[in-house]
């Protein structure tokens, strides 16, 4: 069984910064992608940032230039550095993992709340 453990959410003022981390553990093999999505009430989850096939990084349009994703392959950890946070960044942030090669398996974290408010 695969587990994704997230940390780092919280309350921050507009213009501030937060860092989210996600550590994957368990029977993980052939990682294809790992990254972050976010969701607000009544809306679908949207991509924030992810490492895809070939280590290609993709960012959501609304976070480009403000957020940076990094990873530690040895520990299966991804980190999201969020700068210049805006109220519209308020959401539950979910870590996501795609693995398993041709079997295509995926796992989601439990979510961590980020609130940007003065």
Image (cartoon, rainbow, N blue to C red):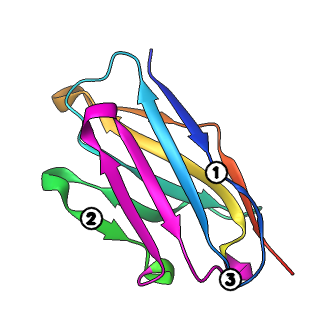
Residue 99 vs residue 44: left or right? left
Crowding near pointer 3: few (<14 within 10 Å), some, many (20+)?
Answer: some
Q: On the rendered image, what quadrant is the N terminus found in?
A: top left
Q: Position of residue 88 (x, y in %)?
A: 69, 79
Residue that label 1 marks: 8
Foreground residue among 16 and 61 = 16
Evaluate if marks 1 and 3 touch, with contact meaning CB atoms under 8 Å apart: no
Queried whether the magenta region covers residue 67, the answer comes back as yes
- Place residue 115 in its image quadrant: bottom right
Label 1 sits on a secondary structure element that is: loop
Queried whether the magenta region covers residue 54, the answer comes back as no
Q: What's the residue at 64%, 51% (across, down)?
A: 8
User: Seen from this angle, which residue lies furthest right?
Assistant: 118
Q: Work out how far the residue at label 1 is from the one at label 2, CA to CA, in angstroms.
A: 21 Å
Residue that label 3 marks: 86
Of marks 3 and 2, which one's residue comes earlier in the chain? 2
Foreground residue among 115 and 110 = 115
Q: On the rendered image, what quadrant is the C terminus found in?
A: bottom right
What residue range appears in magenta? 64-88
Label 2 sits on a secondary structure element that is: strand
Of circles 1 and 3, the one toward us is 1
Label 3 sits on a secondary structure element that is: loop
Residue 57 has which mark?
2
């Amino acid at each position: 069984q695969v587990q994704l453990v997230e940390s780092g959410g919280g309350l921050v003022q507009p213009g501030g910064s937060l860092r989210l981390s996600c550590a994957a553990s368990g029977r993980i093999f052939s990682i294809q992608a790992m990254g972050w999505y976010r969701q607000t009430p009544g809306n679908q989850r949207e991509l924030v940032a992810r490492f895809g096939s070939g280590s290609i990084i993709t960012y959501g349009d609304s976070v480009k230039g403000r957020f940076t994703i990094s990873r530690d392959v040895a520990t299966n950890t991804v980190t999201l550095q969020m700068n210049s946070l805006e109220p519209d960044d308020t959401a539950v942030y979910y870590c996501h993992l795609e693995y398993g090669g041709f079997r295509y398996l995926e796992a989601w974290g439990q979510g961590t709340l980020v609130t940007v408010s003065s």
